[in-house]
Image (spheres, grey):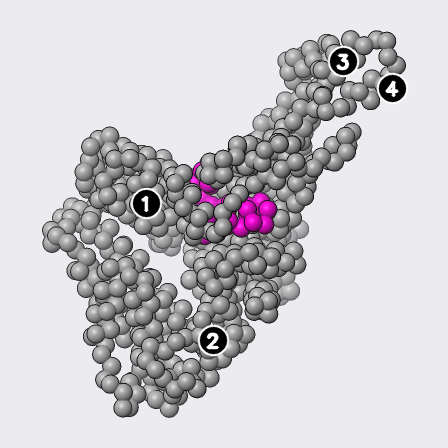
């Protein structure tokens, strides 16, 4: 068992989850005090001791499935020698010669009953059978099972199953739209269970076929915080969205951070009150806490084609930030700039905000290729007057200017008017200033420039963010 | 504690009106076995604080609570010297020389214990709840480390004070900031999310006496449905409980669009969210 657990911990580390020595020892100690025959107990014990961050749970679940799933017991007695009873020569999904004709309808029927009655045991049995018959797994192939899952689900025809299930669960025929909606969600949740069951079964078989380490390696995916923002898939973007919330809160508190203690003015009243305890000697002077100021953040996003994925991310970030900052203004630009603050008003969901920005915001002036120079100049001439010494300007973009004049002088003006100008660049530092990138032209006028290719880097940026405070309270 | 298995923990918690899932029961069981603090994380209103209270109830221990806030310091969390008494002591005693007095005024008699020290010095084992630990600054977090790993507090004038009884420690966090690695390493981690519809229904039945099965079922499903929307603040478990109570008070037997529309403000606390949910649920009901 120790070997399996150390192997499991190694796998977690390989996948990027930081597991310290102490935590590994804790896990071992914890496992000693539980009944390791119980899978749930084992899983939750390992999870509680090894995983300290919600974002790592998916990696944990995947690895746990691979390392601690039981080797499958085939539904029908198969050759004891081969764990997989579908030989590689068979075209996928077809029943074996000599076996009884596979009864797909019967299986569907059984699954339907299991789903309707929320019967875990028969659901599992059904899933096993479905994988047996429909996945057409071929031993020895270095795959992660996504294709098998797809194939099984396609043959099961989930849409039809859903319709039937709704029908079966609809007790009285006359449901209002409202009830119908609740029912549909209920059914979707149940089908998700089936999907997970099937996926688990497939992984179990892959492990039996190729061994834990190999399967784990195939299934390994970068953690959410390590995904390259420029090339994220839409499902990865969705995962990120969940992780963004805490980050924006953190940024909000960073920007609003109070200055150190004792920097406020003397609080005479409280000092005198306190001095009573020391016989009238003001031994413990009290100071007013400087009021945390309300941070004003302006966000400028490059939403041109080259930045497509990243800008989607920054817009997501903007959207999440708009719930944190009352004084957030956002601007989008390609070769000219337009304010998009209102598109992110409270209660507007992200999808419709993005489609409105692409349709309604006037961000294209000439040809739809990035022009930072013109965008910044337009920005400054239109909105520059409203910049104050409390405004933090966040620019996100790759500074690829299509060989147009960078006109960085205007950025200097912006920096002078604002509290700080921060630039987030999604490109690796080594790419900056190559080709049409004008990063260094702009960098000299920014308070700081940061490479933000992953969520982890964004987090680091927020973590280390310190703003010039000298000017903050200038005119308070 | 004297629980032999997570199942028994779960049953005891249930009896105390806290409905744990497998994960919660397992972690509470482990915390007891390994004498480790538990870091409970999750969205607001899923019962993080309740868990600590329930554990206190089932173990028959008293609960000592330290509410964290920005600016919390040693004097508020650990201990403070009662300098008013110290002054009186000095003033009342003019005969002795300074050496004996100065030795005297730094004794336990002049020590004001604050929650953390109190938890450690309690003769009976207690449950220590450190609530919303993510609100303190990183520097203050370090105060907790000594207690969490060794159950001891060092007072320079008195030496190290060891725990006379092992407290069970729960820390809660709303994850507004990343806690330090050092803190996390010392804790078991428990993430509590919104319960699934089944469990929420059970929670409702346990917490709202008189709620019909049918209504509990509906409330749980509506709650799940609303949480699926993109809202500023999703309804918490405590809010669904409030909602169920409201429905009960209004003697509603069946939730439909109108009832939901009229009582949404119990579930959702932002006008924008209310409007959005109302639009989502009532627009589907209109034929055209």
- Tell me, yes or no, if residue B3 can be seen here: yes
Q: Is residue A160 above or below residue A439?
A: below
Q: Are marks 3 and 2 in contact (CB under 8 Å)?
A: no
Task: Name the N-terminal-most of marks 1 and 4.
Answer: 4
- Whether residue B109 is in magenta: the answer is no
Give the letter of the chain under mark 1: B
Labels 1, 2: one chain: no
Magenta region: B23-51
Task: Name the N-terminal-most of marks 3 and 4.
Answer: 3
What is the C-alpha distance between the residues marked 1 and 2?
37 Å
Callout 4 crowding tier (Cα within 10 Å): few <14, some 14–19, many ≥20: few
Label 1: which secondary element = helix
Q: Is residue B148 above or below residue B158?
A: below
Q: Nearer the viewer, mark 4 or mark 2?
A: 4
Residue A39, quarter of picture: bottom left
What is the C-alpha distance between the residues marked 3 and 1?
59 Å
Labels 3, 4: one chain: yes
């Amino acid at each position: 068992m120790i070997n399996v657990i150390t192997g499991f911990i190694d796998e977690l580390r390989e996948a990027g989850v930081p597991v310290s020595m102490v935590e590994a020892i804790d896990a071992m100690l914890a496992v000693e005090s539980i009944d390791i025959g119980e899978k749930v107990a084992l899983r939750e014990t390992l999870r509680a001791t090894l995983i300290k961050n919600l974002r790592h749970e998916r990696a944990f679940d995947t690895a746990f499935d691979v390392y601690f799933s039981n080797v499958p017991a085939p539904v029908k007695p198969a050759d004891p020698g081969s764990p997989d009873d579908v030989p590689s020569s068979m075209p996928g999904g077809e029943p074996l010669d000599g076996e009884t004709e596979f009864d797909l309808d019967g299986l569907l029927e059984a699954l339907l009953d299991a789903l309707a009655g929320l019967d875990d045991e028969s659901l599992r049995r059904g899933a096993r059978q479905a994988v047996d018959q429909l996945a057409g797994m071929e031993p020895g192939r270095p795959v992660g099972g996504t294709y098998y899952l797809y194939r099984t689900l396609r043959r099961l025809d989930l849409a039809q199953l859903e319709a039937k299930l709704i029908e079966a669960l609809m007790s009285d025929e006359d449901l209002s739209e409202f009830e119908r909606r609740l029912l549909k969600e209920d059914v979707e949740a149940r089908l998700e269970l089936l999907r997970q069951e099937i996926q688990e079964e497939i992984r179990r078989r892959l492990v039996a076929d190729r061994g834990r380490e190999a399967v784990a390696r195939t299934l390994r995916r970068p953690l959410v915080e390590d995904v390259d923002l420029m090339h994220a898939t839409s499902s990865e973007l969705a995962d990120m969205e969940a992780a963004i919330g805490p980050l924006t809160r953190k940024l909000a508190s960073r920007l609003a951070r109070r200055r150190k203690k004792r920097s406020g003015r003397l609080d005479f009243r409280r000092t005198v009150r306190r001095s009573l305890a020391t016989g009238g000697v003001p031994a413990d002077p009290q100071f007013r806490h400087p009021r945390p100021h309300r941070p004003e953040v302006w966000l400028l996003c490059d939403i041109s084609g080259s930045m497509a994925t990243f800008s989607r991310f920054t817009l997501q970030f903007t959207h999440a930030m708009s719930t944190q900052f009352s004084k957030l203004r956002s601007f989008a630009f390609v070769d000219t700039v337009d304010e998009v603050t209102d598109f992110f008003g409270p209660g507007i969901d992200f999808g419709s905000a993005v489609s409105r920005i692409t349709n309604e915001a006037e961000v294209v002036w000439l040809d739809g290729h990035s022009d930072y120079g013109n965008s910044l100049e337009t920005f400054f001439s239109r909105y520059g007057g409203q910049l104050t010494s409390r405004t933090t300007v966040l620019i996100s973009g790759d500074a690829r200017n299509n060989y147009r004049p960078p006109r960085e002088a205007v950025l200097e003006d912006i920096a002078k008017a604002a509290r700080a100008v921060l630039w987030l660049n999604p490109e690796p530092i080594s790419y900056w200033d190559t080709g049409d990138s004008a990063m260094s032209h702009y960098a000299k006028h920014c308070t700081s420039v940061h490479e933000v290719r992953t969520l982890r880097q964004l987090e680091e940026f927020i973590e280390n963010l310190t703003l010039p405070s000298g000017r903050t309270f200038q005119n308070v | 504690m004297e629980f032999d298995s997570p199942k028994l923990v779960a049953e005891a918690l249930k009896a105390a009106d806290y409905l744990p899932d497998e994960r919660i029961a397992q972690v509470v069981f482990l915390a007891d076995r390994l004498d480790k603090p538990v870091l409970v994380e999750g969205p607001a209103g899923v019962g993080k604080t309740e868990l600590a209270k329930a554990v206190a109830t089932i173990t028959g221990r008293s609960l000592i609570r330290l509410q964290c806030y920005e600016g919390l310091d040693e004097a508020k969390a650990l201990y403070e010297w009662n300098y008013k008494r110290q002054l009186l002591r000095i003033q009342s005693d003019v005969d002795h020389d300074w050496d004996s007095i100065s030795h005297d005024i730094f004794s336990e008699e002049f020590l004001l214990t604050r929650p953390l020290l109190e938890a450690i010095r309690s003769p009976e084992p207690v449950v220590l709840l450190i609530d919303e630990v993510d609100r303190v600054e990183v520097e203050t977090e370090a105060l907790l480390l000594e207690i969490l790993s060794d159950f001891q507090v060092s007072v320079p004038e008195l030496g190290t004070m060891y725990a006379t009884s092992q407290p069970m420690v729960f820390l809660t966090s709303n994850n507004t900031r990343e806690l330090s690695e050092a803190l996390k390493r010392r804790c078991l981690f428990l993430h509590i999310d919104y319960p699934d519809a089944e469990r929420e229904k059970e929670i409702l039945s346990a917490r709202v006496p008189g709620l019909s099965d049918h209504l509990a079922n509906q409330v749980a499903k509506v709650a799940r449905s609303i949480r699926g929307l993109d809202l500023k603040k999703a309804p918490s478990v405590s809010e669904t409980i409030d909602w169920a109570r409201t429905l009960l008070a209004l003697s509603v037997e069946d939730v439909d669009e109108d009832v939901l529309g009229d009582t949404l403000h119990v579930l959702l606390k932002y006008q924008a969210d209310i409007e959005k949910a109302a639009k989502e649920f009532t627009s589907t009901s209109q034929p055209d």
